[in-house]
Image (tube, helix red, strand yellow):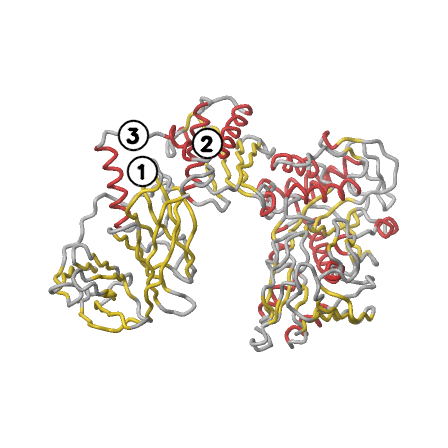
Amino acid sequence: MGASLASLDPAGAGSSPEEVAALAQIGPLVFEHWGAVDTPVGAAGSGAFRVTSWEAGKRAVFAANEEFREGRPFVDSIEIVMGRAAHERLVDLELSKTDLTEIAPQDARRAAEQGVRVSASQPDELLALVFVEHDAPRTSGSIASGNAAGRAGGRASGRPLAPAKEEVMGQALSLAIDRVAIVNFILQKTGEPAGGLLPQWSSGTAFLFPAAAPSAADLEHAKELSKEIAAAGPLVLGYDSADPLEQSVAERIVVNAKEAGMSVRAQAIPGAGGGAEKSRSAALQAGHVDMELVRWRMTSPLPGEALMDFLSRIYAGPLAGIEAGALPETASPEDNYKQQRAVLSTYRVVPLVWLPQVYGLSARVRDWKAPVPGENWPLADVWLDTETPTGVQ
Amino acid sequence: MRPSRGLPLGIRVALYTIVLGLFLSGAPRVSYAQAPSELPKSWNDSVARLADEVAAAMSPTVVKLDVENISSLDVSSAGAIEAAVRVQLQRHSFSFAAEDSAAAQSVARLQLSLSESAAEYVWVVQIINDQSDGAVAPVMIVAAPKADFADAAAGARTLSLEKRFVCKQAERFLDFALWKDATSGEVTLLVLGTNRLTTYKPAGSQWQLSRTSPIPQAAPPSRDPQGTINLAEGKITVKGFACVGDPDLGEGVRCSASKPIRSLGGPRIDIPGFPNSLGTDVKGSCRGDFVFLFTAEGDRTQSDSIRGRLTKGIPLPLVPSGNSLEFDGPVMALHPDPADGSARAVVHNLKTGEYEAYIVTATCGN
């Protein structure tokens, strides 16, 4: 029996984060193992499946590897259809043309209401606002100092903003942004407000980083902070032009900032596709962007490992040039908490929401388990119940 | 499943028996000071470290300790940890303001949060200072392994539960019993419904209807009917009536209105560390502890489970021990069998809609 996936675009350009994440699943299908740094282990074809057909950007077919050392997959083959838009993928699912597809978190509730069988992971992808690092000379600071003093990066828009003011701006935005509204209205309750760099289910300490809707006192405080900053035109907030979720969130932030007396302008950054692993510094530099939205997926369910990965991105990005506090190899919950507190006290990284990975399944898919961070799709374990009538559940 | 109203009578009676027994035997009233010994060593160490950190962060004083459990720890485990934290803080010369006293409004507040990560339990104490002007409250964090509460000590004897399916039917029933005739050795299945007692005889692998004896119903009928079969005394109790065998339960019953059972206590009390679910004591002991069986704390729309718990008596908690038995619906009734370490469970299978009878046996072993 065969299974089919939908809507992948190996070319990458213009791919949505969901498509890129789905593409990343192909490698582990055909190689014996998939290394920690996205490198294959073993020869191609030593994995659970072998490629039997490949039409770039259109279609790929994988056949079960009868000699896979962990046992032959239950399905005979998998057909992957590429280049399908999000709404087309859902229609394919509803018409039983496909068995499995990724669904954008903001579409999950609507899909479920339409009868689509939905599977969601624990929230494991952080959507955050980060200040953009620019190539201006700076002196090294230390995260232990608890602030960004010593930084000398100027604003990309050409109007230098003192580091201390940048910190104040970040704090004011953190106070003013209504994370609960983002979850409730934009994400249709698929996700969780984020106050820290790790979700509660992983760290157990996320409740120490409040992410409630801003109170009147918070907004007042944000207004006071924004008054401390001399207005030099709007701050520019960049978002991935291929990501409708980022666009909606950016527009919401503009509104929240205005309520706190700040001027922020949202700007789409074209060609920024790459989902969780965006590398768009050139586009950001060219676009005179002060802040950007990023989506970072956890690489492990273990809090120490996931935080280590996030910190490597943070100290290569918004906190570049600042000496990182040492995170022990086997970090305790307290170590993880202190590291997060140190990073967040700079206000150059403002967590917004946690997103789950959402999948749409046909009625006949059995033994599908939404993978945890670091796991691949369990396609070798999935089987199809041909007794079950296909169609929308 | 949560009991519909208060604690089941059997549990209350058992508890009062334990309490009474301890007092009559002259046992001293146990204070918090004995609670930590109920925890695994690694958990005790974590609690001690947490208290050490609190003591390092603030001078000993009168405090109010608020506890929030946001982990998968059950109520009794959380209660044991709270008790242990209190003892450790007392050792550091902290004292606690009475919950409703005027002093409690003005003393320093400690917020103990029992949380968990993907790998371990995480226990957090925040020193709440209302005058801190928005500053981050001092935080103390310790980790504790997710080892089974009761089984942490290597080689500890634990309860092992087994279930044996007896019968099922579409109509709800309140209790059942397997009655063996002493002379003929013939087994009879008694099923107590809301308005009749039905007896079945074995016929191959099936049960064959043998007799139906009506039981009068209280007026108005209860929305939460309860009843038990007491084979040892040869009688049946349903709300408002007591029935005796005529001449024995297998041959028919004779019922008369019964007086309401007088409550042993006053108003219902919430006992910290006591599960808010259906439960019963069972005969026997395990490593010297009393043995209880409790259901999960769901409602009648959910699947359910039964797990054994052990306690030395007072103070609680009832410590979970051994495996859980899973059921496809709520456990509607749980009755002890005085003859051995077993209990009778009536389960409403939500998948089939039928009511099922199980015998649950608890054995103690390594």
Residue visible at 22% across and 61% down in the picture: B179
- Give the Cα separation between the discs numbered 3 and 1: 11 Å
Please count the marks in the image: 3
Are discs 2 and 1 less than 8 Å apart at CB? no
Quadrant, the N terminus of chain B:
bottom left
A272, B366: nearer the viewer: B366
Q: Mark 3 lies on which chain?
A: B
Q: In which quarter of the image is residue A219?
A: top right
* Residue B85: mark: 2
Which residue in the rendered view is the most extreme toward the front? B184
Mark 3 or mark 1, which has the lower sequence index?
Answer: 3
Residue A122 lies, in percent from the top left, at: 60, 54
Disc 1 is placed on an element classified as loop
What separation in Å lies between label 2 and label 1 (alpha carbons)? 21 Å
Give the amino acid at mark 1.
Answer: Gly
What residue sits right under mark 1 in the picture?
B313
Residue linked to disc 3: B29
**Disc 3 secondary structure class:** loop
